[in-house]
Structures are given as C-alpha cells and as structure tokens.
Image: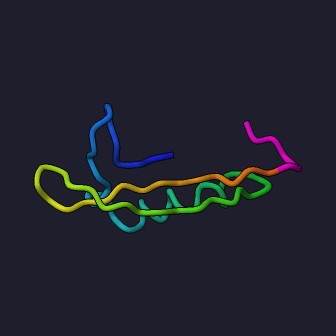
Amino acid sequence: MALGIKNKQFEGIDHLDTHKINDFKQVGYDLIYPALKVKTEFQKVTVNGKDNRIMLLTVESNDKYAFF
C-alpha cells in the first residue's frame, strides 16, 4: 500500500504528525490477529518543488492464514 499518492499524483506525507505516521506503521500489528508482517519503506519525492516522502507498506505472504 502506498500513502501519500492521490489520483496518480504525489501528495507526500510530511504534513502528517509523527503519531499519525506511527499509527499507519502499527496497523498490521494492532488491528489484525494474528499480526501481519509489514515492511515499511519511505521514498523521497518532490511535491510542488519541495522535498517530501511517500510511505510504502508491504505485507509479507503467509502460508498459514488468509487475511480478508
């Protein structure tokens, strides 16, 4: 999943406070049982000539469980 992209355009996530970004990073652990293994990456982007970031969340596959 990518956060900071809307209508195929970069918006970035730097306008979000640290608490909100951490909430997104924790969603696979806090709201789903059994917990998902989520890899979080940040990619630098330019939005309106200014440095910003998007956040990429990758969920690892699991042979034991199906998540819906």
- At a point 69% along the width and 54% down the height, the residue shown is 60
- At a point 74% along the width and 50% down the height, the residue shown is 61
Give x and y (percent) for residue 32.
71, 51
Q: Main secondary structure of the magenta part?
A: loop
Closer to the camera in the image, 38 or 35? 38
The quarter of the picture where the C terminus appears is: top right
Give x and y (percent) for residue 16.
32, 58
Splitting the image into 4 quarters, where does residue 42 fall? Answer: bottom left
Left or right? Give the position of 17 relative to 50: right
Instruction: Give the residue furthest to the right.
Output: 64
Left or right? Give the position of 17 relative to 20: left
Q: How is the image coloured?
A: rainbow
Left or right? Give the position of 16 relative to 61: left
Give x and y (percent) for residue 52.
25, 60
Closer to the camera in the image, 25 or 52? 52
- At a point 50% along the width and 56% down the height, the residue shown is 24
Splitting the image into 4 quarters, where does residue 45 fall? Answer: bottom left
Give x and y (percent) for residue 11.
26, 46
Q: Is residue 50 magenta?
A: no
Instruction: Give the residue furthest to the top.
Output: 7
> How many numbered circles does the render carry?
0
Instruction: Give the residue furthest to the left.
Output: 49
Q: Is residue 66 magenta?
A: yes
- At a point 33% along the width and 64% down the height, the residue shown is 17
Report the magenta residues as a range.
63-68
